[in-house]
Image (cartoon, coloured by chain):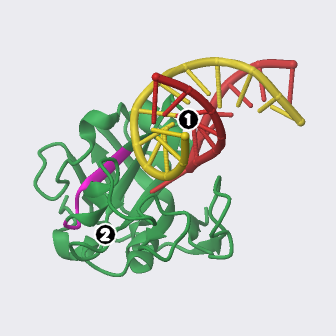
Chain colours: A green, B red, C yellow
DNA sequence: ACCCCGATCGTA
DNA sequence: ACGATCGGGGTT
């Protein structure tokens, strides 16, 4: 399988978030088709972790595209993002849903469940998924129909339809 | 040093 | 509808 390169992620985040649908996420022995994403874009997006500037937690979002941003949420769950756009522009795509095609073949809905199933923790934060041996996104010819909806679990920025769900 | 709360999930 | 659970980040 041919993996997505840095140029894929170094583009407008909404494009990346939509086009990641149908692509294959590979982490170790696990493989799954991405079915749901959300975009978090720049300083003007109040729901973005990086909206108020660079901190120790979000600094990876200010870096080059194609790196994993993994953070702890609610004290017990991890969430996986891929950094997008040019250096110093803080943006990322949250991976929320997966149709697992390795064993066991199950549907995963929710970013916390996704990381728990795959075994992704903050140890994977700052991984370069363009060069990593066993952590990357593979291209796919899948053509995907999707719908755009408000993002989940946030209290501001709900006016933006930046949640993308692949139709079955 | 302290306090509030979150890009969630499972159970009630 | 709500509690679990804890680090980040702002405030004192």
| Magenta-highlighted residues | A64-70
Q: Whole-percent x and y of residue A122?
A: 32, 36
Q: Whole-percent x and y of residue A168?
A: 61, 61
* Rendered residue at 50%/61% (across/down): A37
Report the quarter where the N terminus of chain A lies. Answer: bottom left
Q: Whole-percent x and y of residue A77?
A: 49, 33
The crowd level at tag 2 (other Cα within 10 Å; few <14, some 14-19, many 20+) is: many
Identify the chain of the residue marked 1, using the numbered disc in the image. A
Location of residue A95 with respect to A150 vertically, above or below: above
Marker disc for residue A84:
2
Q: In this rendering, does residue A65 appear at all?
A: yes
Q: How many numbered discs sit on the rendered protein?
A: 2
Location of residue A152 with respect to A140 vertically, above or below: above
Image position of A52 (left or right of A47): left
Location of residue B11 (image quadrant) = top right
Q: Whole-percent x and y of residue A8?
A: 25, 74
Identify the chain of the residue marked 2, using the numbered disc in the image. A
Under tag 2, what secondary structure?
Answer: loop
Closer to us: A124 or A118: A124
Location of residue A88 (image quadrant) = bottom left
Identify the residue under disc 1. A74
């Amino acid at each position: 399988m041919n993996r997505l390169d840095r140029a894929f992620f170094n583009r407008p985040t909404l494009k990346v978030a939509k086009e990641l649908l149908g692509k294959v996420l590979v982490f170790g022995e696990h493989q799954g088709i991405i079915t749901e994403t959300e975009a978090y874009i720049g300083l003007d997006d109040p729901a973005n972790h990086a909206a108020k500037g660079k901190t120790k937690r979000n600094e990876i979002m200010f870096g080059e595209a194609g790196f994993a941003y993994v953070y702890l949420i609610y004290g017990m769950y991890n969430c996986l993002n891929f950094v997008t756009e040019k250096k110093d522009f803080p943006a990322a795509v949250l991976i929320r849903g997966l149709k697992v095609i390795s064993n066991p073949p199950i549907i995963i809905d929710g970013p916390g469940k996704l990381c728990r199933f795959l075994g992704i923790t903050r140890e994977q934060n700052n991984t370069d998924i363009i060069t990593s041996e066993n952590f990357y996104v593979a291209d796919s010819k899948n053509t995907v129909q999707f719908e755009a909806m408000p993002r989940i679990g946030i209290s501001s920025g709900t006016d933006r339809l930046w949640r993308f769900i692949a139709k079955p």
